Amino acid sequence: MGRSRYKIVDPVLPHFVTCTVLHWIPIFTRPATVEIVLESLRFLQSEGLKIYAYVVLENHLHMVVQSSNLNRDMARFKSYTSRQLLAYLAEHNARRFLDQLVFYKKAHKSDRQYQFWQEGFHPEWIENDVMMRQKIEYIHQNPVERGYVDLAEHWRYSSARDYSGVGGLIEVVRVW
């Protein structure tokens, strides 16, 4: 799981997680880069990952997720998306971003040219319904708090659309 101080309490319980692009570089500003993230999540859902809520912003994402092996699924998610996103950046000659991913790479990551994600995913166990509602509200209000939209359901890359009755881009589990 990397060097994070956060730990998964019980892998079969829902957890709030955060994945951040190295040095908060704004990679998710194009639909194609966000689609790589969503494609990976859809695949993991087909293998048992439950997503209760999510939001993808320009340089990080938050989710409430659950699976039989959350460490493994998050490692698979970060590994796949980093490979695909680096390939996308190279294909589109995004030198500035690629140079930053080299420059900010941690010294101990000597086995690779780039580091895409910050280490860890900061899992926080969802202990009860109150905490679940609080985390989902936090996730959905993130784009509103940043001033990107006036209403949470207007953010395309969020499960707020599902919770407001409008279809979202990936399925979410709304019963816990």
Image (cartoon, helix red, strand yellow):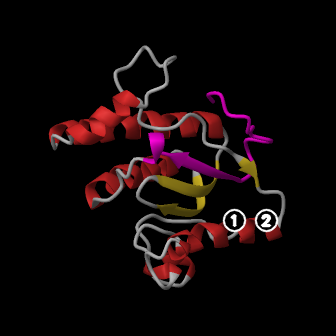
What secondary structure is marked by label 1? helix
Residue displayed at 49% across by 53% down: 60
Residue displayed at 32% across by 41% down: 85
Query: 10 Å neighbourhood of mark 2: few (<14), some, or many (≥20)?
Result: few
Can you identify the residue that label 1 sits on?
A: 135
Q: Could you tell whether 68 is left or right of 110 in the image? A: right
What secondary structure is marked by label 2? helix
- Is the residue 173 above or below the residue 45 in the image? below
Q: Real-space Cα distance between discs 1 and 2? A: 6 Å
* Image-quadrant location for residue 170: bottom left
Q: Nearer the viewer, residue 86 or 94?
A: 94
* Image-quadrant location for residue 92: top left
Q: Assess whether mark 2 and mark 1 are in contact (beta carbons under 8 angstroms).
A: yes
- Three-letter code for the amino acid on which mark 1 is drawn: Lys
The stretch drawn in magenta includes residue 123? no
Residue displayed at 66% across by 44% down: 122
Can you identify the residue that label 2 sits on?
A: 131
Q: Could you tell whether 106 is left or right of 32 in the image? A: right
Place of residue 63 in the rendered image (x, y in percent of width and height, measured from the top left): 58, 57
- Is the residue 174 above or below the residue 123 in the image? below
Q: Nearer the viewer, residue 120 or 80?
A: 120
The magenta region covers 1-24
- Three-letter code for the amino acid on which mark 2 is drawn: Met
